[in-house]
C-alpha cells in the first residue's frame, strides 16, 4: 500500500486507497518506516488532506506533533553549534537533518532527525572537536570519515571531513566547499548546492543499503522539489570522476523503479540496474522476515556497487 500511496501524493491522477482496511494497512507501513511527518506535510502541500479519512488524518497530525517537539529540540541544539562556529569564524556545513527537512520538505519538522551531522574542513578537525566539546559534548571516537561526540542524554554530533569512506572512492571534499553558499545570514556557516546535496543524499542512502523507504523518499522529494537544480548528466559525470557512479546508479535505479513517472520529467541517463531491491523485501526485513531475495539484495550492496576492482576488493575485507 505504501508505495502506490506515495506515488499518488506526487501525481493527482493516481488514486488514494478506497477502503478502511487499506488505510489501516497503510498506517501500519507509514509507522513502520517513521514517515508520518513527511506524509503529513506532502498532503498539506498538495491540498489533499480532505481526501483521506478523519481518523487517518488525526493520526498523522498526532505523529507529526510528536516529531515537531523532537525536531524543535534538535533545531535548538543545531543552532547552538552553528552560532558557535560562526562566532569563531570556523567553516561548517550542516548535512541532512533539520536543514534538509526545511529546504526540501518545506518545514524543519517534516522529517524526523536523530542526530546532528556537520561537514567541516579536514584540516580543522581538532579545532572543531574542541569547539563542540565546549557545549558539553564528550568526544567518543574518530571512525572512517567522521568524528563522533555525544552528550550524556544521548544526543550525538558527527563531524565529517568528507562525504564518503576514504577507501571506497576517490571523492574529494573541495568541490563541495567551492560551490557551497552562505546559509541564511551566516557568513561561515554554509549549505551545499542542490546538486551536491542530492549527491550526498544518494551516497547516504547507499551507505545504508537503501534499507528504508525514508531513503527512497528523500531522493524522490528532491527530484520533485528541485529538479531544475539537479542535472543528472552532470551528477553522473561527477560520480564517474569520484568513482561512485555505480552507487549513484543503484540508488537512482531503486527510486525510479518505485516512482517510474520520474522518467517523464527527469529521465535517467542510464539503464536501470537490477539491485534485487523491492518494497516487499524491505518491508518484510523490517518485520524480521528475510527471504532469499533479501540476501541477494544485501550481497549486491555489499560487493557490487563499486566502480573499480580495487574498491571492490576493499569491500571484501570490510563490507560496505
Image (spheres, helix red, strand yellow):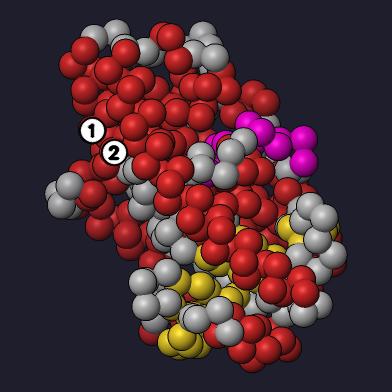
* Quarter of the C terminus within the rendering: bottom left
Residue that mark 1 sits on: 28
Compared with residue 97, is residue 262 higher up or lower down, i.e. above or below? above
Residue at screen point 33% across, 62% down: 299
Q: What stretch is highlighted in magenta?
A: 216-229
Q: In the drawing, what numbered circle is on residue 233?
A: none
Q: Which of 283 and 56 is in front in this view?
A: 56
Crowding near pointer 1: few (<14 within 10 Å), some, many (20+)? some
Residue that mark 2 sits on: 31
Residue 174, position in %: x, y?
Answer: 78, 73
Residue at screen point 22% across, 26% down: 25
Q: Nearer the viewer, residue 284 or 246?
A: 284
Residue at screen point 43% across, 59% down: 114
**Position of residue 190 in the picture relative to residue 5 (left or right):** right
Answer yes or no: do the residues labelled 1 and 2 have beta carbons within 8 Å?
yes
Residue at screen point 67% across, 67% down: 82
Residue 216, position in %: x, y?
Answer: 47, 43
Q: Nearer the viewer, residue 269 or 107?
A: 107
Amino acid at each position: 500500500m505504501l508505495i502506490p500511496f506515495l506515488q499518488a501524493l506526487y501525481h493527482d491522477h493516481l488514486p488514494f486507497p478506497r477502503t478502511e482496511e487499506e488505510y489501516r494497512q497503510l498506517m501500519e507501513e507509514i509507522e513502520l518506516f517513521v514517515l508520518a511527518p513527511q506524509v503529513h506535510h506532502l498532503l498539506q502541500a498538495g491540498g489533499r488532506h480532505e481526501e483521506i479519512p478523519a481518523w487517518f488524518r488525526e493520526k498523522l497530525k498526532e505523529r507529526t506533533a510528536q516529531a515537531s517537539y523532537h525536531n524543535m529540540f534538535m533545531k535548538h541544539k543545531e543552532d547552538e553549534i552553528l552560532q558557535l562556529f560562526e562566532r569563531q569564524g570556523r567553516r561548517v556545513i550542516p548535512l541532512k537533518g533539520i536543514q534538509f527537512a526545511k529546504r526540501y520538505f518545506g518545514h524543519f519538522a517534516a522529517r524526523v532527525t536523530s542526530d546532528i551531522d556537520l561537514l567541516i574542513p579536514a584540516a580543522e578537525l581538532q579545532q572543531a572537536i574542541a569547539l563542540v566539546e565546549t557545549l558539553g559534548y564528550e568526544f567518543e571516537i574518530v571512525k572512517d570519515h567522521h568524528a563522533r561526540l555525544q552528550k550524556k542524554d544521548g544526543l550525538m554530533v558527527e563531524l565529517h571531513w568528507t562525504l564518503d569512506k576514504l577507501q571506497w572512492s576517490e571523492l574529494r571534499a573541495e568541490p563541495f566547499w567551492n560551490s557551497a553558499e552562505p546559509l541564511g545570514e551566516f557568513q561561515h556557516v554554509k549549505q551545499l548546492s542542490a546538486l551536491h546535496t542530492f549527491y550526498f543524499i544518494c551516497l547516504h542512502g547507499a551507505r545504508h543499503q537503501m534499507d528504508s523507504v525514508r531513503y527512497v523518499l528523500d531522493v524522490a522529494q528532491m527530484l520533485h522539489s528541485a529538479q531544475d537544480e539537479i542535472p543528472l548528466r552532470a551528477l553522473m559525470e561527477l560520480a564517474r570522476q569520484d568513482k561512485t557512479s555505480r552507487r549513484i546508479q543503484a540508488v537512482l535505479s531503486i527510486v525510479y523503479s518505485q516512482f517510474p513517472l520520474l522518467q517523464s520529467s527527469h529521465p535517467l541517463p542510464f539503464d536501470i540496474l537490477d539491485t534485487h531491491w523491492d518494497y516487499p523485501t524491505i518491508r518484510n526485513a523490517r518485520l524480521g522476515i528475510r527471504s532469499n531475495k533479501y540476501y541477494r539484495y544485501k550481497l549486491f550492496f555489499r560487493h557490487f556497487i563499486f566502480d573499480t576492482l580495487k574498491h571492490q576488493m576493499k569491500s571484501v575485507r570490510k563490507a560496505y
